[in-house]
């Protein structure tokens, strides 16, 4: 049993923040909590005919937003079955200030609906719960995207408008703020940039539809490869080989190997995206 913190076994404290389940089993955590809420959250919804214009606006709006605001572009299906494009927001600050920050969004274009309002933080976290009902078949593909170019927007709209399952979701969550200003070597997670997470979250109800959904997801992911980062998050990996594991850990891989040698030299914890205790 080892207790680790910035002052106790600091090397292990560094490694578990991004190193996956490679070093042992964590039995308890201590967190520093921050009061949050209510937040100014929700989304604006637009007709798919406006998708390219909406994504171009999202690119400019999100790039200049303050730390308190997180944004996400999403291709969804409304409850009545209509395909829509959304800009999802969460402002974790004073609601009155959030209203000012979100004013450019709420006056942009001709939205089908503006669903942004003060809500509880936990309500914000469950916003998409109904879009992922239990019992579905799933196949997901993910990458980092540093910039949403006009060429990438063309591909995003082309594939999002032809998804074979109405419950599949395509999202571009924004990754920015304080987390992006941490040094790449400060924790085992190295990918500290202002960027987006490109996510194809395919899901469908009938196993007979698996082939067409798998084919669409893979084709979409391949079409986006010219625009994504070569680095990946370990959370993005499926049954990938050693090369992709190295890409997930980036510049920190060799240091993680040394940590593995120290805490798990026999590679007992190997049923994961494995860091082998050899170079």
Image (cartoon, rainbow, N blue to C red):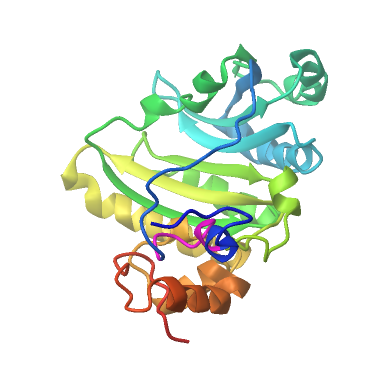
Q: Please indicate, yes or no, whether residue 238 appears anywhere in the rendered image.
A: yes
- In the rendered image, which quarter contains the N terminus? bottom left
Q: Is residue 33 above or below residue 270?
A: above
Residue 195 within the segment the image draws in magenta = no
Residue 17 within the segment the image draws in magenta = yes
Q: Is residue 277 above or below residue 97?
A: below
Residue 107 sits in which quadrant?
top right
Residue 92 sits in which quadrant?
top right
Question: Does residue 70 appear to the left or right of 221 in the view shown?
Answer: right
- Disc count in the image? 0
Q: Which residues are magenta?
A: 15-22
Q: Please indicate, yes or no, whether residue 244 appears anywhere in the rendered image.
A: no
The image shows residue 101 at horizontal and vertical percentages of 81, 24
Question: Does residue 125 appear to the left or right of 79 in the view shown?
Answer: right
Residue nearest the observer in this picture, 107 or 264: 264
The image shows residue 236 at horizontal and vertical percentages of 45, 57
**Outermost residue toward the bottom in this view:** 279
Who's the residue at 31% across and 50% down the image? 213
- Magenta stretch mostly in which secondary structure? loop
Who's the residue at 51% across and 36% down the image? 75
Who's the residue at 33% across and 75% down the image? 267
Who's the residue at 55% across and 79% down the image? 254
The image shows residue 227 at horizontal and vertical percentages of 62, 62
């Amino acid at each position: 049993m080892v207790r680790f913190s910035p002052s106790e076994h600091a090397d292990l404290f560094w490694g578990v923040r991004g190193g996956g389940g490679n070093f042992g089993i964590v039995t308890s955590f201590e967190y520093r909590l921050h009061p949050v809420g209510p937040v100014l959250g929700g989304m604006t919804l637009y007709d798919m005919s406006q998708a390219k214009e909406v994504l171009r606006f999202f690119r400019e709006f999100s790039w200049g937003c303050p730390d308190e605001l997180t944004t996400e572009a999403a291709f969804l299906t409304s409850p009545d079955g209509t395909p829509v494009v959304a800009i999802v927001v969460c402002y974790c600050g004073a609601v009155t200030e959030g209203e000012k920050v979100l004013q450019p969004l709420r006056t942009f274009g001709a939205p089908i609906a503006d669903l942004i309002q003060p809500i509880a933080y936990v309500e914000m976290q469950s916003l998409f719960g109904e879009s992922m009902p239990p019992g579905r078949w799933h196949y997901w593909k993910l990458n980092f995207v540093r910039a949403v170019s006009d060429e990438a927007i063309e591909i995003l709209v082309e594939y999002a408008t032809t998804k074979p399952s109405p419950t599949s979701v395509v999202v571009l969550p924004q990754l920015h703020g304080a987390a992006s200003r941490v040094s790449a070597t400060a924790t085992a997670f190295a990918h500290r940039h202002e960027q987006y997470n490109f996510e194809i979250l395919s899901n469908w109800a009938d196993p007979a539809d698996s082939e067409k959904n798998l084919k669409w997801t893979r084709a979409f992911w391949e079409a986006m490869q010219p625009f994504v980062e070569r680095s990946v998050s370990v959370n993005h990996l499926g049954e990938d080989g050693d090369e992709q594991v190295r890409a997930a850990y980036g510049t920190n891989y060799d240091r993680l190997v040394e940590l593995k040698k120290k805490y798990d030299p026999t590679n007992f914890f190997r049923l994961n995206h494995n860091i082998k205790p050899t170079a």
